[in-house]
Each structure stands twice: as structure tokens, then as C-alpha cells.
Amino acid sequence: MTTPSGTSPQAFIGVDVGGTHTDVAVVSGERLVRGKALTTYDDFSRGVLSAIGVAAGELGMELSELMPQGRMLINGTTVVTNIITQLRGSKVGVLVTAGFKDVFRIAGGPRLNVADDHLQTNVPDIVARSAISEITERVNYAGDVVVPLDEEQIAREAQRLVEEEGVASIAVCFLSSHLNGDHELRAEKIIQQRYPDLFVTPSHRVFPVRGETRRFTTAVLNCFVHDQARTYIDSIADKLAGAGLPQPPVFLQGLGGGISKERAKEHPLALLGSGPAGGALGANELGKRLGYKRVLLGDMGGTSFDTGIINDNEVHTQKNLEIGQLQTGVNLVDVVSVGAGGGSIAWVSERGIPQVGPHSAGSTPGPAAYGKGGVEPTVTDAMTLMGFIDPDNYLGGRMRLNVDLARQALETKFAKHFDWSAERAAAAVHDLVVVNMAHAVREVSVGKGYDPRNFTFLAYGGTLPLFASQIADRLKIPTVVIPQNSSVFCALGALTSDFVLRKDQTVDWKLTNPDDVARVNEVADRLLATAHEEMRAEGFAAEEITTARSADFRFEGQVYELTLPLPDRSLTPEDTKELAERFYELYERVYGIGTAFAGVPEVLLNYTVTVTGPQPRPPMPELALSPTPLDEVRKGERRVYIPMLQEWQTIPTYDGGKFTPGTECSGPAIIDENDTTIFAPPGTHVTRDGFGNYVMTREEA
């Protein structure tokens, strides 16, 4: 899918539509510029084009000049994430095997991990009970048809769901369809013969592995988000084309890797978590470039804080994601998210305990300091009041923050409950959000058996550079790296992604039966052929496509699996011994020495093929170190309330635009970039490397 290069200038455009801001990174020639605008919920394309326009201005051109130069535009978004989080999707109808209507109500019997039974809640109903139709059909555990499909019943129930229930889409969820999907496919055809424009998702198409609850829920969620996701995808694509983009945009998956507009509309659930995935991909790419194999990543924007771990330059994938109480078959880049963003609201619980998040003021009305009607105190209000954010330089000076409104919100909604001054309340908000984020980083490192002291903290997002050093301090992380263009790093990270397709299939192979390997290889060959055919249809030549194989293993009788990479070839009976040993070692590494079930057969449950097609990557050259004297970089002083000291101090401020590679400074200090602010606390040393990253370390006492 490589676009032929011409003599005209070429631009690579990464877009990340977040909950508060829409971020854009543009690489044109050897220049890397960024654009940021408020997310426009009534029409997301307005915010996208506005942010691209800001980036175009940084290049000294108009939007109409930049867009025709676009060689690639890739878009990550929180749109699908927000639909599911808020449970505000479209009405879905379901055709389910007779007798299994209550799968959605029972939902695997999930329970909250709390001691008080009164706090247990039912799984949310994402499908109305009246919109679930039971269908006479049955495929058994081996994939054999034992009850034929009642095709007339399919037609009747589809008509009822559409014309009486008013559903916008239908999920077809038949038992054992991962082994034999013929009934689901026939039902889809019958529905579309009568309603050709109706969106239909057969469950085995989105999750062809064992587990009825996860497969059915995944199919329903794919329908649940489809209407709004389709509107978003079409609007973005049409408006970008109208603005002059010469080819359709690519959409980033939460799994990491791009997909086409058509594939995104067929499987919109794949866009879940795509924004954080861009950051993780970019963090891994930057870690490789800088020689860091172990990276803890952090992304703090306007709405949330996302964190994850990269070990040995491998981005970990979370399988079978649980979204609240919903058990799904979604696979995502493994990122933990907490409600700690610039727009996170500070509040007081009924028990009188100060809290920050998870609720956010978003972009509308936004923090009180925005002056757009917001009255709740936020993290942005606290940092503005304490002097960390220059109210005249917010979003590069395109928005002015009102310090008085920030003070008023903090005093009336937060400080008065504790008889605090506004400054002390702001410091408390700072401390609470730092603790929340440090706890999340600890969860993805210590909680998984890794020592954060052996990692580098790569901190990005428009807000995190204000807090990165304090988080690292709490966890004794020795080095913090704040990337160049950190405020749009997820958008920039999206530009490092390739086109990725993943195919899974349950094979249920006991390794104690090595002679059954031919059946497994038959499935693997079929998955590989299908994946390669689909990649070629996307425009990739056969020699461009690379393949990775993996499988899910468990001991017989277990419910959950662990994943191991497989050799890129057919398996042989002789492989069973090595596979069993590798699984045994992995199991005890994850769960502890002595936990493996000796004597119990190991099972290769699901086989996975992942194929990758290369996307063009923008050049990002390393610059020679050319330090600028600090007196030339210094732009002045600022009076700042230092939260860890609980006092006002006047500290130097530096111009990030003049902070050239090799330039160094010591904290306390503030470095003002166009759309983010970096705070170096007392005892911190900062230098800028050849890639434009700020590297922060603790000075020796």
C-alpha cells in the first residue's frame, strides 16, 4: 500500500481526537510541527481541520496548501471509547439460539471485587430484552448441525426487530458459530435481502474463538457503536477529501496498526482505545531510537491519564478486554486509564474526603478558567492559580485563561470545606492527582512483577510534563523523558504504525496428542491464506506482507489462557515437548514457582495469525548538539506556588523554542512550550537531546 513518491512536497499527518483536545502532528520534509484545537463534539471534523490548520500555519502555509501534500493521514480517536463508557450507543437487535436469551443477563456471572454484597450490581443491559429474538437452530460442540436453521423465523423476527422494535442493527449470535458459522452467515444474507442497508454482525466474524458470552457481547458492541462510528468515519473522510487530501485516511486500531475506512466501518469496535494505542506505539518507537528497552509510559491529556509498560521493546496486548462488567473478546494495547486529566474535577465526597476525578469538565464547558460557563474546579484551574500555566500562552496564545475564575471555583467548591486558602486547595489538587497517577504506574509495573526503578518514564500529553518528575520521584524512577511535541505525541505515534490484520481461531489441541497437529496446521494455513488475501485486497504486494504467529495456552480445565509466540512455519509433532515446556515456564513466571499443574495436559486453545503491511514512515533525523547559553533561553521569571514546599517562589522560565539540543538547566524552573508546560522541581536536572526530547534526572544531593 505504499504511495508512489513524487517530486512535490509530501506531508505525513497524525490525528488524535481526544475527549478535550484534538491533536495533530505533521511531518513535512525535515520539519515536525504540531497543531491543537478543542474537540468539537457536534462535528468532529471541524476540530480536526482546525488543528491541521494550526499545524499548517506553523509551516507557513494555508490548510488548502498542506492537504494536497498529504501522503498519509492516520486517525486515532476516543469516539468509540466514549460511546461504550457512557453506554450511549444505538439500539441493537439480537438473533440468538433458542434457549440462550439469558446469556446477556447472566453474562458469565461477573461480580465486583468488593466485600459488601449491597454494592454488587447487574451487568448493564446493552440490549433491550424485547429486542432479543430466539431462533430455532443448533450447532453442537464439534461444529455439526443438529437442528436446522429456521429461515422463515429469521425473516419474521428480523422484520419484528426492525419495524416494531426500531433497531438500527442486528447481531447474530448462534451457539458454537466459531466452529461452524454457516447458520450465522445464512441469517445475515436473509436479513440483508430484506433490509440491504441494515448493519449486521455475525458473532464469529468479530470473535471466532470459544466463549459464547464474550463472542456474543463483542458482536453486540460492534453493532452498538456502529451508527455513531460510521457517521464519524464518513464525516472525517468526506471533509478531509473536500479539504484536498488526495487519498482516504487510515484509522488506527486499539490493537495498534491501521485499517482502511471500509474495514473500520465493518468493524468499528476495532477503534476502541485507538488514541492510547498511538501513544504506546510511539513510545516504543522512541524507546528503540534512544536505546531504552524498558519503558513506563504515561499520557495525561484533558480527560484522563493512561499508562502502560513496554518490556524488551515489546508492546503488550491485553486479550479479552473486560469493559466494566462486560466480558468481551476485544484485544487492545495494554493501557490502564484513570480519571486524572487537566479537566478532572476536584470535589469532596459525602464523607468529607477530597477527591480528584474521574469526572471531567471536558472541553465544554471546560475548566472554570476557560470562561465558558464551567464552575467546577479542575486540575487546570489549580495549576493556573499556582502560576504553572501562563494564562496568556494557553494553546499558543489562542485562548486566555481567567485566573480569577479559577480561584473562585477552587474557593467556593473545594477550599471552603477544609477552611483552606485557594493556594493550599490548589496544592492539594496537585498532590491528589500525582498520587492517583503514581498509583496507576505502580499497578502496571509492581503489580505485574516489574521494578519501576529499572525503567525509564516516558511522559507525554499536554498536561503530564507538569507532573512527570513528581510521579517519578514517588516511584524512584531515575530518568524521565518528555518527547518533543509531547502534547500531540499520540498523534505522532500513530505515524509509526503499520497496517495490521489479526485472525484467530479455536483449535483446542491437547499437546499430549501430537498426531493431531495436522488439524492445527490446516486451521493455521486457512487463517494465513485469508489474512494474506485481505491484505492484498488493501493494496499490499505479497512480498511486503510479514507474518507473526502466536497461540493461547492453558492447562486442561482452566478458564483463562496465556499467550506464547509460535515459529513462522507449520508445527510438527516434535514441537509439542518444547511448547509444553515454554508454557510451563511462562506460567510459573507469571503466577509463581510451583503454581503450574504438573501432570495436567497442556492445551493450545486458540491459534492466531497477525499480518502486517508497511505504512510509509516520515523521516525523523537526529540533530547535532548545539547548546544555547541559558541567559539567551531565559524568558523571565514567574511567581509560582511550589506545592511540595507550600510556599510562593519566584523561579526562572525558559523559552522551549530556544532550548536547543544540548542546552541544560536545573530546577526549580519552568520551560514554556507552545502548547505545554514543563515543570522541573527543586533538585531536578534537565537537558535536551538530539531528537528534541527533554531528559530529566534527579541531581545528586
Image: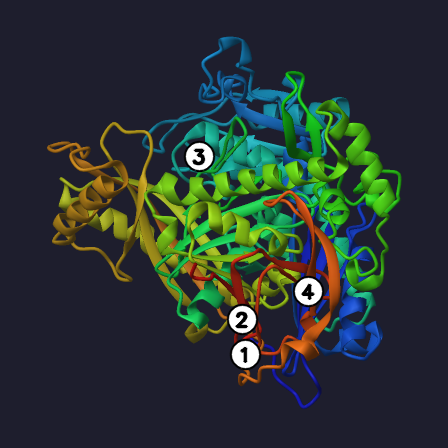
Contact (CB < 8 A) between labels 4 and 3? Answer: no
Between discs 1 and 4, the one toward the N terminus: 4
Q: For numbered disc 2, what is the local secondary structure?
A: strand
| Mark 3 surroundings: few (<14), some (14-19) or many (≥20) residues within 10 A | many
- Furthest residue to the bottom? 7
Q: Is residue 66 above or below residue 401?
A: below
Mark closer to the observer (2, 4) = 4
Task: Residue 177: give its label.
Answer: 3
Mark closer to the observer (3, 1) = 1
Location of residue 148 in the rendering, given as x and y in whole percent from the top left corner:
46, 26
Q: Identify which residue is drawn at 51% across, 31% down.
A: 216
| Mark 4 surroundings: few (<14), some (14-19) or many (≥20) residues within 10 A | some
Residue placed under numbered mark 2 in the picture = 687
Mark closer to the observer (4, 3) = 4
Q: Identify which residue is drawn at 55% across, 69% down.
A: 693
Dot 4 amino acid type: Pro
Contact (CB < 8 A) between labels 3 and 1? Answer: no
Mark closer to the observer (1, 4) = 4
Dot 2 amino acid type: Thr
Q: Is residue 609 visible?
A: yes
Mark closer to the observer (2, 3) = 2
Residue placed under numbered mark 4 in the picture = 652
Gap between marks 4 and 3 measured at Cα: 65 Å
Between discs 3 and 1, the one toward the N terminus: 3
| Mark 2 surroundings: few (<14), some (14-19) or many (≥20) residues within 10 A | many
Gap between marks 1 and 4 measured at Cα: 19 Å
Between discs 4 and 3, the one toward the N terminus: 3
Q: Identify which residue is drawn at 65% across, 83% down.
A: 29
Between discs 2 and 4, the one toward the N terminus: 4
Residue placed under numbered mark 1 in the picture = 662
Location of residue 117 in the rendering, given as x and y in whole percent from the top left corner:
49, 9
Q: Is residue 330 visible?
A: no
